[in-house]
Amino acid sequence: MSNLTSIMTNVDSYKGSMFKQYPTGTEYVYSYIESRGGKYDRTLYTGIQAFNKKYLTPRITQAQIDFAEKVWTSHGMPFNREGWEYILNTHDGKLPVTIRSAREGLVIPTKNVLATIENTDPNCWWLTTWIETALLRAVWYPTTVATVSWHIKQVIAEYLNKSGDIAGLPFKLHDFGARGVSSAESAEIGGAAHAINFMGSDTIAIIPYLMEYYGADIGSIAYSIPAAEHSTITSWGREHEVDAYRNMVTQFGKKDAILAVVSDSYDIYKACEMWGTVLKDDVIKSGATVVIRPDSGDPVVVLPKMLKILADKFGTTTNAKGYKVLNNVRIIWGDGINAMSLQSILRTVVDVCGYSADNFAFGMGGGLLQQCDRDTQEFAMKCSAVGAREMIPAPWNPNVVIPDLVWRDVYKDPVTASNKASKRGRVTLWESGGEYKSQVEQPMTWTDKGVGPWVNALVEVFRDGEVMNEITFEEVRANSNK
């Protein structure tokens, strides 16, 4: 681990003084992560395994401790050198914490525990909340992206089931977000979260990322197709626009191939006329499907006009569900897509115009990977219990007191914001028949509904520097479809 990724500086500044703030005798601190609500009532949970592997498994070193001390003291903050050197010398630099987590890919109602963390060495009680900054970020961002993507998937699936072939669903929402995020790591993490739901992506960085952290098969992660951008069309000059389009068909058109051509650099409607007249024979003879991409305008206005031109020129086939399917060409819309705009588009082209959803794919960039924050799903990590050594009556003689570990509930309940009230105790996630509850004790069996006993849905994924119970990307995808 380099100084740039060290957990000793991957933290909010105020955490530096917290080792001096817990009550005397504190030995264990127990915290949990949840989505307290937000835009959607369910979240598709993901992200924790990659974080554990990248940031928590590398052992800390003396050189990193020395460097971190310089950083913290120059920052005007105390530094817990004794605590970090204890971890180095006693645990060989491995972090003495345990993390329990829901299985990645599961769609879980909000207000439920998704992960818990607790120190395993009583001398490292301060370590649990130290990791909060990085761990919470590692969960909220990919989970929020995956959640947005999953809910859009449900909208598209509804219209495909109504008007087309559901088998095409995995390629209906393409990731255009690599250039629109704040960092390369965001592209990897967010793009990988989206890939749980869909297999079309232009964020190629997710392939090595998912291979490294989730053991993904290189040939099953995500796919893309040859596609034009405005510069490769406009560089031919406006007078040679049709030649630019023909070149795309010549270069990439072959039997059963798919290629995408942005066609609104000048006039999308005239471009559709070109595709359906002077270029029609080229398209048909190639055996390829040409995906025409408009990149501007109001889609509920632009798409019906495009459909009319393309249907007049290429013709349509009526499928078994009574909806029209364009011959030889398709359309992808990738400008300003979000859950609401996509639903409006499908309502227009399917319900009003009578075209199958098979005709359309969508691209989503900043709206997918960047237009979300921790408040989108109201994510929080909170301490819910502390264990302290206290003098208590001995079980064999109440007149004798002995030191024992006593757990105390920890919670917040602000009178000005009841939605921010936190959970109490060593809370966990229970599951029974696809239902979830978050509480300390195991719920009662649902005998009246014939559902089996509640089981703890959290599994240990990290302990004392080692990743536990690894999950593959294929398993994550399978969980999202349960």
Image (cartoon, grey):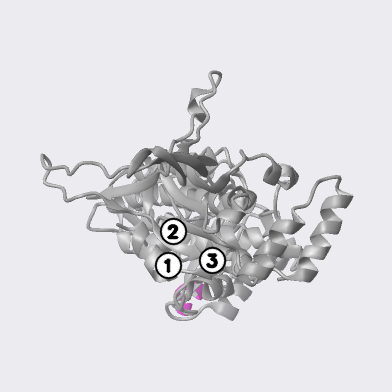
The image quadrant where one finds the N terminus is bottom right
Label 2 and label 1: CA atoms lie apart by 17 Å
- Seen at 50% across and 65% down, the residue is 463
Tally of numbered discs? 3
SS at mark 1 in the image: loop
- Seen at 36% across and 47% down, the residue is 429
Discs 1/3, front: 3
Residue at the extreme right: 74
Q: From which residue to which does the magenta span run? A: 282-286
- Seen at 63% across and 75% down, the residue is 247
Label 2 and label 3: CA atoms lie apart by 42 Å
| Disc 3 packing (10 Å; few <14; some 14–19; many ≥20) | some
Front residue of 215 and 319: 215
The image quadrant where one finds the C terminus is bottom left
Label 1 and label 3: CA atoms lie apart by 57 Å
Discs 2/3, front: 3
Q: Where is 346 relative to 36, above or below?
A: below
- Seen at 44% across and 57% down, the residue is 100
Give x and y (percent) for residue 115: 46, 51
Sequence-earlier tag: 1 or 3: 1
- Residue type, mark 3 in image: Asp
Sequence-earlier tag: 2 or 3: 2
SS at mark 3 in the image: loop
Q: Tell me the tag on residue 328.
A: 1
Front residue of 110 and 151: 110
**Magenta stretch contains residue 186:** no
- Residue type, mark 2 in image: Lys
Q: Which residue is mark 3?
A: 464
Give x and y (percent) for residue 11: 70, 51
Q: Where is 412 relative to 351, above or below?
A: above
